[in-house]
Amino acid sequence: MSSKAQQGTLKIELGRRYHFAASHRLHSPALSEEENCRIYGKCNNPFGHGHNYVVEVLVSGEIDPATGMIANLADLDGFVEREILDPFDHKSLNEDVAAFDAAVPTTENLCIEIFRRLQTFPKAKLERVRVQETSNNSFEYAGDHPQGFER
């Protein structure tokens, strides 16, 4: 092992994957009914629709020489469970998540909201979040938008 790694200055990234199911309706009060139907199509269904989301969280940090880890997986799992899984799993994003009271719960906005909630993880630096909505659609956010999405 190099002296740099022994001193705890070697930075490494840790990726972890989580799953939750939630429903949403893509509908903007700023648009007419016709525009909502045209833009969002079947995703504008008044009853909503659901997805089995996959969330990938990537954190980085120095390796703790005593534990050999940048963060304990149990700590990260508990944090993600409290901040993301408990409030989102088997919920209506439109009705049950306050962040979407005024924002359309697109997966782009969901990705930004998840990043916002996870960036306070105290044990490592949040690098980015990736949300897979379907086998064809995924979105990634690294916190590079200064204000997040408009609320």
Image: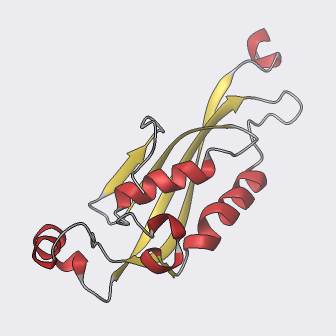
5 or 30, which lies in front? Answer: 30
Question: Which residue is the extreme one toward the top?
Answer: 3
The percent coordinates of residue 37 (x first, y second) are 14, 76
Q: In this view, does 131 lie above or below 82?
A: above
The quadrant where residue 43 appears = bottom left
Number of dots carrying numbers: 0
Q: Which residue is at 67% across, 65% downward?
A: 81
| Viewport quadrant of the C terminus | bottom left
Q: Which residue is at 40% across, 50% downward?
A: 149
Judging from the image, the colouring scheme is secondary structure
Q: Is residue 42 above or below residue 2?
A: below
Question: Which residue is the extreme one toward the right?
Answer: 66
| Viewport quadrant of the N terminus | top right
The percent coordinates of residue 92 (x first, y second) are 46, 80
Residue 57 visible in image: yes
The percent coordinates of residue 113 (x first, y second) are 50, 55
For this view, does 109 lie left or right of residue 55? left
The percent coordinates of residue 2 (x first, y second) are 75, 12
Q: Which residue is at 82% across, 30% downward?
A: 64
38 or 34, which lies in front? Answer: 34
Question: Which residue is the extreme one toward the bottom?
Answer: 47
Residue 2 visible in image: no
For this view, does 128 lie left or right of residue 121? left
Q: In this view, does 71 lie above or below 137?
A: above
Q: Which residue is at 68% across, 45% downward?
A: 120
